Image (cartoon, rainbow, N blue to C red):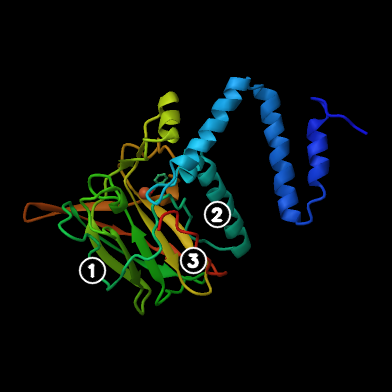
């Protein structure tokens, strides 16, 4: 019979987990325990610090609601969400052996049922004010062939940096819409130029950012989810070039390829912007994520 010691506890836990029949669960939990115990051995938390850590996790749950997912936010500000996305980008590209648009994190504000719109419609609903922005591009398959009838789901923050679900002044589903590509694989929609915005700071993640002297402001961006049966769902973001926070995104989401070219034009003294951005899909199952908010 082996009694527990500080030295053997990691081995004992791993042995117990070895009985898990499902191989991936076994692998994930054993690795988690190895790294968790190594972290604890390195940091040697005091009892008070352990309590604080548990309270942090509990408050992630308490601060999660239909309007906000603090658990995803924690993963984002730790760089974990983006790291997972980057690893899966590389894997997908290796499997497909071809160029494909980089993915970016989903974020906490995707809603599954944005209204279907006609090409050229605006997603700026109600009396949303802001610089007009036209967005167009082509969706390609793995052979570089334009994909007709693909779905381009777009969502973004308002010119004052709020998603509609955070802002009672905006209409339901404002700045959200789904567009079908035409026979040439092209999509086209109108909107208003989004502003950068702070990630929510009224919960434990905000406390952590402040304690680490980090600003909460994401650079301005559009979110896209591009889908077509027989293809992997592409979740990505396109960032506004020239934004001051491109290299200090609190969720570490900006890679070089995700920066889009927003062009500003002046017509009759009024400024409007255009963005042309194409997407390349890879073949695979069309599996959608679970919406973080309804
Ligand atoms: C977003 O881009 O919507 C987002 C991503 C991570 C945290 C907060 C917001
Ligand atoms: Fe966003």
The disc label shown at residue 246, or none: none
Residue at 27%, 65% (x, y): give it: 189
Circle 2 crowding by C-alpha within 10 Å: few under 14, some 14–19, many from 20: some
User: Between disc 3 and disc 2, whose residue precedes?
Assistant: 2
Q: Which residue is mark 3?
A: 281
Q: Quadrant of residue 181?
A: bottom left
Disc 2 + disc 1, Cβ < 8 Å: no
Name the residue carrying label 1: 121
Quote the CA–CA distance across marks 1 and 3: 24 Å
Q: Secondary structure at mark 1?
A: loop
| Relative to 247, residue 146 above or below | below
Q: Which residue occupies 51% across, 72% down?
A: 143
Quarter of the image containing the N terminus? top right
Picture coordinates of residue 188, whole percent (x, y): 29, 68
Looking at the picture, does residue 130 appear above or below residue 99? Answer: above
Q: Of helix, strand and loop, which one carries label 2?
A: helix
Identify the residue at horizontal 41%, vertical 35% (top origin): 203
The residues bearing labels 2 and 1 have C-alpha atoms spaced at a distance of: 31 Å
159 left or right, relative to 67: left
Which image quarter holds the C terminus? bottom left
Q: Nearer the viewer, mark 1 or mark 3?
A: 1
Residue at image mark 2: 89
Of 44 and 139, the residue lying toward us: 44
Residue 283 spot, x, y in % from top left:
55, 70
Mark nearest the camera among 2 and 1 is: 1
Please report whichever mark, 2 or 1, sits nearer to the chain's N-terminal start.
Answer: 2
The answer to whether residue 91 is left or right of residue 180 is: right
Count of labels in the image: 3
Quarter of the image for residue 5 reads: top right
């Amino acid at each position: 019979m082996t009694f527990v010691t500080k030295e053997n506890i990691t081995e004992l836990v791993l042995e117990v987990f070895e009985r898990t029949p499902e191989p991936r669960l076994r692998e994930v939990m054993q690795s988690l325990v190895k790294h968790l115990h190594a972290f604890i051995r390195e940091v040697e938390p005091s009892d008070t610090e352990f309590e604080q850590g548990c309270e942090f996790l509990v408050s992630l749950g308490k601060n999660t609601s239909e309007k906000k997912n603090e658990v995803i936010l924690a993963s984002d500000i730790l760089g974990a969400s983006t790291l997972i996305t980057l690893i899966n980008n590389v894997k997908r590209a290796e499997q497909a052996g071809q160029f494909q648009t980089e993915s970016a994190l989903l974020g906490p504000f995707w809603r599954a049922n944005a209204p279907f719109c006609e090409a050229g419609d605006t997603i700026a609903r109600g009396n949303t004010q802001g610089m007009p922005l036209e967005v167009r591009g082509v969706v390609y398959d793995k052979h570089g062939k334009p994909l007709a009838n693909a779905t381009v789901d777009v969502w973004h923050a308002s010119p004052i940096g709020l998603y509609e679900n955070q802002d009672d002044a905006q209409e339901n589903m404002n700045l959200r819409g789904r567009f079908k590509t035409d026979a040439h694989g092209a999509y086209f929609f109108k909107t208003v130029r989004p502003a950068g915005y702070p990630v929510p700071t009224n919960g434990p993640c905000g406390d952590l950012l402040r304690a680490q002297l980090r600003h909460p402001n994401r650079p301005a961006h559009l979110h896209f989810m591009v889908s077509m049966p027989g293809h992997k769902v592409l979740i990505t973001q396109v960032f506004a070039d020239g934004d001051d926070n491109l290299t200090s995104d609190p969720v570490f989401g900006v890679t070089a390829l995700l920066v889009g070219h927003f062009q500003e034009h002046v017509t009759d003294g009024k400024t409007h912007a255009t963005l042309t951005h194409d997407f390349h899909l890879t073949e695979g199952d069309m599996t959608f994520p679970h919406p973080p908010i309804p």
